[in-house]
Image: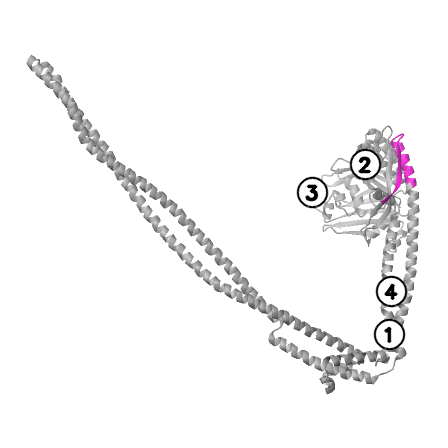
Amino acid sequence: MRLSHITISGFKSFAKKTTIDVTHQVTGVVGPNGSGKSNVAEAIRFVLGEQSMKSMRGKLGSDLIFKGSEHLSPLSRASVTMVIDNRDKVDTTHASQELAPYLVYDQLTLARVIYADGTSDYTLNDAKVRLKDVQELLAFAGIGGSNHTIINQGEADKILLASPRERKEAIEDALGLRVFHIRLHESERKLEKVKVHVHEVELLRKEVAPHLIHLKRQVDKLESKEKERQLLHRLLTAYFVREERELAILNEKIHEAGTSHSLSLITNSIHKELEVLREKKSEVQTNSHHEKHTLQAEIRTLLERRDQVTKTLGRLEAEKNYLQKELVKEEVATDVVVGYEIFRKTGEDVKHIAHTIKDAISEQRVDTLVPLMQTVDGSVHFFESHAKSRESDKESIKNKLIELDGEIKAYEEKEVDMAKTVKSLEEKLESVNTQAETAIHSRFEEEKKKVLLESKLRELESMIALRKQEEGEVASRKERFDALLAEGSVIVGREVLSYRETTPEETYMTMEKPALMKAIERSKLRIEEAGIPNASEVIAEYKTTKEREEYLSKELADIRQTEAKLLELIKELQTSLEERFNTGIKRISEIFTDFFAEVFPNGKGKLVLINMTRTDEDGNTITEQGVDIDVSLPHKKVKEIQMFSGGERALTSIALLFAMSSLTPPPFMVLDETDAPLDESNARKYGSMLSRLAEKSKLLVITHNRETMNHCDMLYGVTIGVDGSSRLLSINFKEAEGFAR
């Protein structure tokens, strides 16, 4: 099988139908970041059946469909088609019945379509197929999983950092052994079904065997015992009539006393009433407490404010008393002080003036009398001014007293109002307390009612338990009645069903119930021992049962034969798988050694098989094989791959992946910028390995590296068009004459 071309339509940035010709040995895809060149690798991963949206850089299936642009509308679906040349016709010995018809065609067209709701369809040559069929086809094509067929920069390290068990599985895929695993898994699944079928048939045979023996014994000993059958008929008739009558009486008593269901309805009603009482209690207590708390808070606030007003009023009254005293003092002081001052002031002046006037008259100095007279006038003026000042102070005190009287009156009114408010609130609080006491009394009555209801509830629950026990006993007796009726119709015949129309014998009607039941059981045993009345039916049943047992025996033999063939096939597949793997791993190790020595001169590398143990879910120890990588770089003591540089790890992983692909070359490989971490020198080594690998597989290389481009036969350039979608431009190096590489 060889890849011919790939067609992408509506997938991610490829809005329009785009075809990539991969008939050349090495096809390159280049382009700037964001142009959509990696979408080519993801499209191939998509058509190969990739289920992880994360590996295709998406969250939902709809993320893979072109979202639209300024010039193009969004699309509702996306498709990728892969055309495979099948003219060489692979070996289809192990192909499934579903896939085999397609493998005869010279050309296989595999397509996958995804819709906006995330669902997708697979078609093979325009016929719908399952993902399982696609995986099987890819296994036959040598593609296996996509881990070593489509390799990007991040996945190149995976083969190095994988566990030995995972690395072994990857190598098996590369060797084309996946188809053996598919067939082996299918065979094991069929074997499990066969084992289940064997177990079921054996169970059926075990189930049939006792009945067959029983029928054989009956056929051998078959003798009609009509008398015993008639006796059993009479016994059963008496039992059925008596039991039905007693059950009717019991049911009537139960209904009169109340069934468990009706009593349950009453208990439900009581439960609801109790719930109402509980909710009412909670509501009353909550409301009363809240209102009382609010009133008490308001009273406390008003009392605090009234205390402040009282304090202020006391201060104002004290200030008033003080001013009144000052006013009295001022009035007394005015008279005393003024008189004293006048006396003190004028006494001295008058004496002086008198002596002076006396001297002036005796000396006849009239000119000295004028100043003396002015002195007397000044003293009089001083007295008058001092008196006016005292009057002004008294007037100021009187005005202040008037203002204080106004303020005192306002505060007294305020104090009275607050006292009234406090009294109103206290009365309201007393009313609330009274209501609370009333509610408590009411609650007491409700508690009494609750106790009575709970007592009634316990009584009803006891009655319900008792009633259920009675109903259970009635149901059990009715079940035994129906079972015996059914059994009697089989043993005696359908005429036993007409027991209501038959008059029972008095003897059996008056017999004690335990004695009647024992008589019925003994009669049944005698009929079973001596034979049964329906001989023809027994014979027919015996014949049918024997034929069924013979059929099961033959079927079991066929299944055993199928099981043996499946075991042989599984052993053959396991042997082939083991042989091919051992041969393949040895050859891959040799090729890996060559590749490793080529990229790391004097370096050594090989693959080593190791045995590992693990514990399964049942706690059993399982020994498995794994593949380890043993490498050593020249001039370096480091052997742990994790300690290698990025370029060294890249070349090592590429060498291993190329070695895996060289032995059983897949029809194509996609290398998505696996050369990104390589410098120019290592890129040349990478190009050399590309040339060797291209001899056996077609390569689709997504790269930025010029050295890698030099090894391409066809080069596609990816660019974003004016409409916002990815477009391809191609150059055929083989046809382009004079093109300088």
Q: Looking at the image, is mark 1 or mark 3 earlier in the sequence?
A: 3
User: In the image, is residue 251 above or below residue 342?
Assistant: below
Q: Is residue 329 left or right of residue 545?
A: left
Front residue of 528 and 612: 528
Q: Amino acid at mark 1?
A: His
Q: Looking at the image, is mark 3 or mark 4 earlier in the sequence?
A: 3
Q: Amino acid at mark 2?
A: Thr
Give the foreground label among 1 and 3. Answer: 1
Q: Secondary structure beneath disc 1?
A: helix
Q: Amino acid at mark 4?
A: Glu
Q: Which residue is mark 2?
A: 674
Q: Is residue 608 magenta?
A: yes
Colour pattern of the rendering: one colour
Q: Is residue 308 left or right of residue 667?
A: left
Q: Which residue is mark 3?
A: 69
The reply to whether callout 4 and callout 1 are in contact (CB within 8 Å) is: no
Neighbour class for label 2 at 10 Å: few (<14), some, many (≥20)? many
Which mark, residue 202? 4
Front residue of 121 and 311: 311
Mark 2 and mark 3: Cα distance apart in space? 31 Å
Q: Secondary structure beneath disc 3?
A: loop
Neighbour class for label 1 at 10 Å: few (<14), some, many (≥20)? some
Mark 4 and mark 2: Cα distance apart in space? 59 Å
Which mark, residue 214? 1
Q: Which residues are magenta?
A: 586-612
Q: Secondary structure beneath disc 4?
A: helix
Using the rendered view, name the quadrant where residue 497 is placed.
bottom right
